[in-house]
Amino acid sequence: MKRKAIYPGSFDPPTNGHLDLIQRGSKIFDELVVAVLGNPEKDPLFSVADRRKMLEAMTADFDNVSVDTFDGLTVEYALRVGASAVLRGIRAISDYEYELQMALMNRKLQPGLETVFMMPAEKYSYLSSRLVREVAQLGGSIDCLVPSLVAQKLREKMDVADKFAVDLAASREAEATAVSKTKPRKKKS
Ligand code: PNS
């Protein structure tokens, strides 16, 4: 029987830590599906389609890795695609509590589905998508944290955001000037 697993996550954006885990997972499973959650509750930086494209490019060299998107429960998605395991990464002990809770809830929902935890390389143990977003938004270098195509996409996002901020400031200034010019002056008494 083929050992098929899903690796679910937000991947907003995918990092070198995710890639490291995909590499490790692809060695122990016959088939690995990287599953991007389309979570409408969060306000993501990248659309699900963008995240999928980035992950597809990052994993193009792995024959047994594919990328998909899903909504709803992870266990239901796993069942739908015929996976028998969920792969998750644990970087530090602080991840463990949340991951354990999730793994046990998934087991409650679907007892036949196993969660497999793997550790990324130590050099990625501090790395998270949230920190990458923050560093990129504040103008720091993210080159060693994400694959180059992701770094490029992040820079494009930040350029668009910067341009938007500059345009917004300019239009507010123009508006304020126009208002002050049209305001009637007080008559001298
Ligand atoms: O990369 P993330 O954000 O840590 O991934 C979390 C994810 C997507 C694995 C988790 O939020 C999830 O499984 N969401 C789908 C909804 C679900 O199944 N919820 C119950 C989990 S116990």
Image: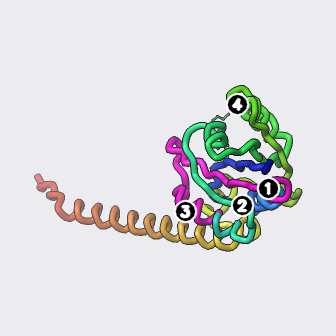
Residue linked to disc 3 = 50
Q: Earlier in the sequence, mark 1 or mark 3?
A: 1
**Image spot of residue 27 (x, y percent):** 84, 59
What amino acid is labelled 2 in the image? Val
Residue located at (75% from left, 49% from top): 4
Q: In the rendered image, which quarter is residue 93 located in?
A: top right
Q: Work out whether 46 lies above or below 6.
A: below
Residue tagged by mark 4? 110
Dot 1: within a 10 Å radius of its alpha carbon, few (fewer than 14), some, or many (20 or more) residues?
Answer: some
Going by the numbered disc 4, the residue's amino acid type is Gln
Q: Label 2: how many residues lie within 10 Å, few (<14), some (14-19) or many (20+)?
A: many
In depth, the one of 53 and 134 nearer the eye is 53
Q: Badge 4: how crowded within 10 Å, few (<14), some, or many (20+)? A: some
Under tag 4, what secondary structure? loop
Query: In front of the other: label 1 or label 4?
Result: 1
Callout in the foreground (1, 3): 1
* Circle 1: residue type: Asp
Mark 3: secondary structure:
helix
Residue annotated with mark 2: 65
- Quarter of the render that holds ligand 1: top right
| Residue at the spot of label 1 | 30
